[in-house]
Structures are given as structure tokens and as C-alpha cells.
Amino acid sequence: MLGLDMRFGAIGKAVLAQPEVAIGIIPGGGGTQRLARVMGQARALEVVLGCNDFTAEVAERYGYINRALPPGELAPFVQNLAHQIASFPAEAIALAKKSVQNAVELPIVEGLFEETALFAQSLTTAPARRRMRKFLEIGGQTREGELDLSDMIQKLAEET
């Protein structure tokens, strides 16, 4: 689960744990490495060494999952998020994911250089040029547009 780009849990249903140490082994499959990266060393040690269950609410607070939602809201939220992301240019998604991954893997200065290069690369794509032009046409750079970016993003998805 920790290898996923995003993780969500249903309040009252999701229970997360790393029970391996209690049975004499350590978490495998990247468990110790990813936990420390998503929640910090101290909390990762609490999870790994404590071997306790964590509710969705605590898991969200610790960074184990992105968001904890009531069961009836979970699927619609995830579906809406997935549809929104899918409406964006594939090139921008891939470059943004690479840049965020660099933030985890590289020292900050190197990450900033890589981000600059990826940003410049993103500017050269045809979808970016089309969408930036459309964003300006529909008022995305105005105060009103900035105050309602969700609406601007929706209009952009509909019109490009």
C-alpha cells in the first residue's frame, strides 16, 4: 500500500498496521523505507516497533494515508479525484510526479535544479501551450479567476 501514489481510508473500517516486529521480522517490500519518508522517523518507529493498529483518522494524521473519509464518501471522492487528474495532460502528470519523487530522493538543491529543468520541459509541450492560452482567455490570471481556481480548472478541462 505504501508504494501507491496516494492512499485513502474509510473511517470506521480501515485499520493499518505493521505487525512484523512482533513476530520477529521487519516489514519488507519497502515498508520501513516508505513509512519513514511519509511520516518521519519517530512516527515510523512507533508504527514499526509498536505493532499497533491505526484507525483511518490516526493514519491520516500520521501521513500513512492521504485522507480519511466516511465510507459513503470515499469512493466518490477518489473517483472524482481520479477523473480530475485524468483530465490533465499526461505529460504534465508524468513530469509533476517525477519532480515530486525527486523531492523525496534528492538533496534540496539538486531537486530544485531538476524541478527547473522539468518545468522548462513542461512549457514546451503542445497541451501546455494550448491550456495556458485558454487559461488566459477565460480569465485565469485575474483576481476573480484566482479566487475560484476550481471553476477555472473545470472550464479548462471542458474546453481543451
Image (cartoon, rainbow, N blue to C red):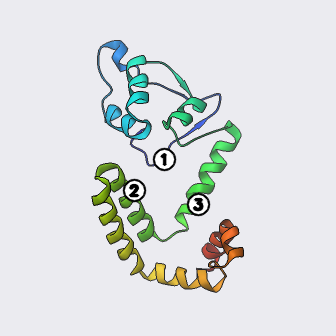
Q: Amino acid at mark 3?
A: His
Q: Is residue 53 above or below residue 37?
A: above
C-alpha span from label 2 to label 3: 20 Å
Relative image position of residue 108 (x, y in whole percent):
32, 55
Q: Are marks 1 and 2 in contact (CB under 8 Å)?
A: no
Element carrying mark 2: helix
Q: Are marks 2 and 3 in contact (CB under 8 Å)?
A: no
- Disc assigned to residue 25: none
Residue 75 lies in what quarter of the image? top right
Horizontal side of 30 relative to 8 (left or right) equals left
**In the rendered structure, which disc, 2 or 3, sits on the residue that comes first in sequence?**
3
- Pair 2/3: label in front: 2
Residue 98 lies in what quarter of the image? bottom left
Element carrying mark 1: loop
Q: Amino acid at mark 1?
A: Met
Q: Amino acid at mark 2?
A: Val
Number of labels in the image equals: 3
Q: Residue at x 70, y 40 (%)?
A: 72
Element carrying mark 3: helix
- Disc assigned to residue 83: 3
As drawn, the residue found furthest toward the front would be 109
Residue 139 lies in what quarter of the image? bottom right
Which quadrant is home to the N terminus?
A: top left
Q: Residue at x 39, y 71 (%)?
A: 119
C-alpha span from label 1 to label 2: 12 Å
Reading the image, the residue beneath label 1 is 6
Q: Residue at x 40, y 35 (%)?
A: 40
Reading the image, the residue beneath label 2 is 100
Horizontal side of 105 relative to 40 (left or right) equals left
**In the rendered structure, which disc, 1 or 2, sits on the residue that comes first in sequence?**
1
C-alpha span from label 1 to label 3: 14 Å
- Pair 1/3: label in front: 1
